[in-house]
Amino acid sequence: LEQLIVFLPALFAFAHYVQPTIAAGVGALFIVGRAIYFRGYVADAPKRAPGSLVSAACQAVLLLGGLIGAVVQLV
C-alpha cells in the first residue's frame, strides 16, 4: 500500500499529460514487479531486489514523465 501513494498520482499524471496507452503498459509492468517482489519477500530477503527494481523504475518513469509533461504544458 505504501507504493500506491506515489504510483497512482504518477500514473494519472502520466496518462493525462503524456499518453494513456503507455501509462497503462507501465502500470501493468509495475503490478508485475510488485508480484515478483511479493514472491521474493515470501521466499528470501535477497530475492526481493528484482521486483523492487522493476517497481521503482516504473514509478520513476511515470513520475518524471508526468512532471515533465505538466511543465511542458504550462510553458
Image (cartoon, helix red, strand yellow):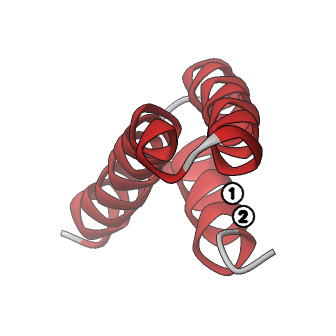
Residue 74 placement, left or right of 45? left
Disc 2 marks a residue whose amino acid type is Leu
Q: Position of residue 68 (x, y in %)?
A: 25, 58
* SS at circle 1: helix
Q: Amino acid at mark 1?
A: Phe
Q: Identify the residue under disc 2.
A: 8
Q: Quadrant of residue 30?
A: top right
Q: Position of residue 5 (x, y in %)?
A: 68, 80
Asked if residue 22 is positioned above or below residue 33 in the image, the reply reads above
Q: Residue at x 56, y 62 (%)?
A: 10
In the structure shown, which secondary structural element does the residue marked by tag 2 occupy? helix
Depth order, front residue of 43/22: 43
Image quarter (top left, top right, bottom left or bottom right) of the C terminus: bottom left
Identify the residue shown where x is 70% and y is 39%. 43
Figure label count? 2
Name the residue: 41% across, 45% down.
Answer: 46
In the picture, the disc for residue 72 is: none
Mark 2, other Cα within 10 Å: few <14 / some 14–19 / many ≥20: some
Q: Which residue is mark 1?
A: 12
Viewer-nearest of labels 2 and 1?
A: 2
- Which of these two is toward me, 47 or 32? 47
